[in-house]
Image (cartoon, rainbow, N blue to C red):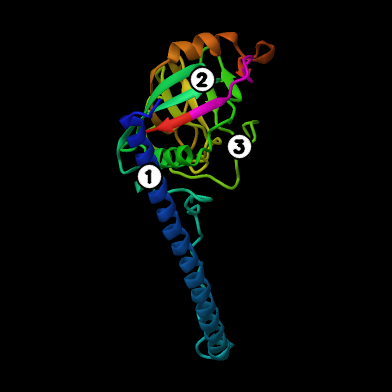
Amino acid sequence: MAPSKNTEREAREARERLRRYNARQAVHENRLTRRRRDNIIAIIGVVAVAAAATGLQLFYFNGGPGTPTPVPSASETLAPEGQNVGNVPEPGFAEGKTYTGTLVLNGDVTLGVTLDAALAPQAVSSILADSLTGYYVDKTCHRLVTGTAGLIQCGSLDGTGATDPSYSYGPIENAPADGLYPAGTIAMARAGNDAYSNGRQFFIVFQDTTLPADSAGGYTVVGQVTSGLDDLVSKIADAGAVDGASDGAPVVPTTITSFTIQ
């Protein structure tokens, strides 16, 4: 059967998005290379100037009339700002658009999804880029939380849920002020108390759930499940977690079959 015009158009659009992504990443890498080079040059210049200044100070202030009156130095109280790690796309990559897509689990649970890049530009740009490169295919959903909370977490690099030290970003975007994540919410997982530890893992809330904020805040909400949530519950979540735990690996082994975004 010949592919439909819609399928051909979507394929062309996906190839074009991937081409733009690769081009932007090349520009980004060149910018980082220039920045590292400029920093090295600047450091060499600063060291040279500091050495010269130190020599003059030792000559002038060593017990002579220019000896200064000691004064307390200001303490450094500000923590360094968080920064992205790895090949993280620029927030503008998703162009502030609302995307629709399909997330298929185990080949028989099909979830319609929407992603809002206007509300979470950095996180949606990351998901969009990863979907274009096929990162999510065959990644597992390693964690199921049941009881007063209800969510399934997916996308771990090694399937254990461990963070990936080679890829992380921030800040937290579009987190609910009241800590309430309604059923169908798609949000980014992160490490505790670290706003720049978002990565490729995300979670889907399948029942209204309250997640308390930590010192970094809440969790970045990227979008919503628009269809198929009942299948997720009946075919995966209802079976619970291994050994009857309220937080653990799902009894039904769950793998991402595909994640396509238009």
Which of 258 and 115 lies nearest the eye of the viewer?
A: 258
Circles 3 and 1 in contact, beta carbons < 8 Å: no
Q: Is residue 133 above or below residue 26?
A: above
Q: Is residue 88 above or below residue 52?
A: above
C-alpha gap between disc 1 and disc 2: 30 Å
Query: In the rendering, at what x and y percent does residue 53 appear?
Result: 52, 84
Residue 245 visible to an observer of this rendering: yes
Secondary element at tag 1: helix
| Residue behind mark 3 | 157
| Residue behind mark 2 | 151
Q: Is residue 28 magenta?
A: no
Mark with earlier residue (2, 3): 2
Circle number at residue 194: none
Circles 1 and 2 in contact, beta carbons < 8 Å: no
Q: Residue furthest front?
A: 1
| Residue behind mark 1 | 17
Circles 2 and 3 in contact, beta carbons < 8 Å: no
Which of 90 and 221 lies nearest the eye of the viewer?
A: 90
Q: Amino acid at mark 1?
A: Arg
Quarter of the image where the C terminus is located: top left
Magenta range is 248-258
Secondary element at tag 3: loop
Quarter of the image where the N terminus is located: top left
Query: In the rendering, at what x and y percent does residue 36 appear?
Result: 51, 67
